[in-house]
Image: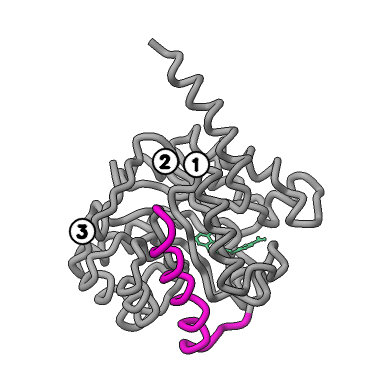
Amino acid sequence: MHISFNGRTLSLDTPKIMGILNVTPDSFSDGGNFNKLDNALAHAREMVEDGASIIDIGGESTRPGAAPVSLDEELSRVIPAVEAISKNLDVMISIDTSQPQVMKEAVAAGAHIWNDIRALRLDGAIQMAANLQVPVILMHMQGDPVTMQVNPHYDDVVSEVYNFLIARCDDAIDAGIKKENIILDLGFGFGKSVKHNFQLLDSMDHFVRAGYPVLSALSRKSMIGAATGIENPKDRTTGSVAGALLSIEKGAQLVRVHDVKETKQAFDVYQAMLNSRT
Ligand code: PT1
């Protein structure tokens, strides 16, 4: 399995790390320290040196309760960062957006992957992805970022999330998106209780068997806080690395993380174990 776009290819034969680069003024666990372009590029470079294969750039905060941003605001945050990173670093770039116009301009500026927490449900999104032929990450969310954590409910979280994702894949393929350009994401923290999140983590192998690459994104999230009792997201690195390692052991090919260096160290240990098998 691999992801290819715009002359760049990433093999998914071994698990790969996506490093999070927030370009929002209120980034939930970087305290908004990386707003200026120089800082964004330096942070991206550090993550590449630490072992990131993808840099995920997000100009819209989507953590629980976050307010929406305007299209112009999102473009002015994202596009300069894409230009700077694609010009200076040898890495794939994903864009954390739901807006087709943002993705169109990001691809023109050098981006490689559309990371959409709304799974291409905004007007024109699915057609834009098909036109661009860009690899897409389709994520499950119940509700919207403003209200999703109010009272999440499922009769069977695993089958409901699974059926949603497979239905979005089918719609994407019907719209002209190639099957090999689709990545699945269970959407930890998006309209889910702590128990729902851990039931999904425990079932990640079930999603892997659907035949699409799976991205696991639980870094520093409240599910890690709930499991560990650690309140400050920045202090959740060890728990987040444990979650990333459990994910790849269940077959996830991609993890989206804040702490690239620490995650890479854990993955190296996992790979050494696999390499020892004859
Ligand atoms: C995600 C994701 C994302 N999460 C993808 N993109 C966020 N593909 C942003 C909490 O519970 O899971 N997959 N882009 C950030 N969103 C959250 C959600 C942050 C929940 C924190 C929490 O603490």
In the rendered image, which residue does mark 3 sit on? 178
**Closer-to-camera residue (260/250):** 260
Q: Secondary structure at mark 3?
A: loop
Q: Could you classify mark 1 by the number of other residues whose Cα lies within 10 Å: few (under 14), some (14-19), or many (20 or more)? A: some
Q: Badge 3: few (under 14), some or many (20 or more) residues near its Cα, within 10 Å?
A: some
Q: Which badge, 3 or 1, comes first in the chain's sequence?
A: 3
Residue at image mark 1: 203
Q: Are marks 3 and 1 in contact (CB under 8 Å)?
A: no
The amino acid type, in three-letter code, at marker 3 is Lys
How packed is label 2: few (under 14 Cα within 10 Å), some, or many (20 or more)?
some
How far apart are the two marked residues, 1 and 2, measured between alpha carbons? 5 Å
The residue lying at 28 percent from left, 41 percent from top is 1
Residue at image coords 39%, 64%: 87
| Span highlighted in magenta in the image | 67-90
Label 3 CB sits under 8 Å from any ligand 1 atom = no
Q: Amino acid at mark 2?
A: His
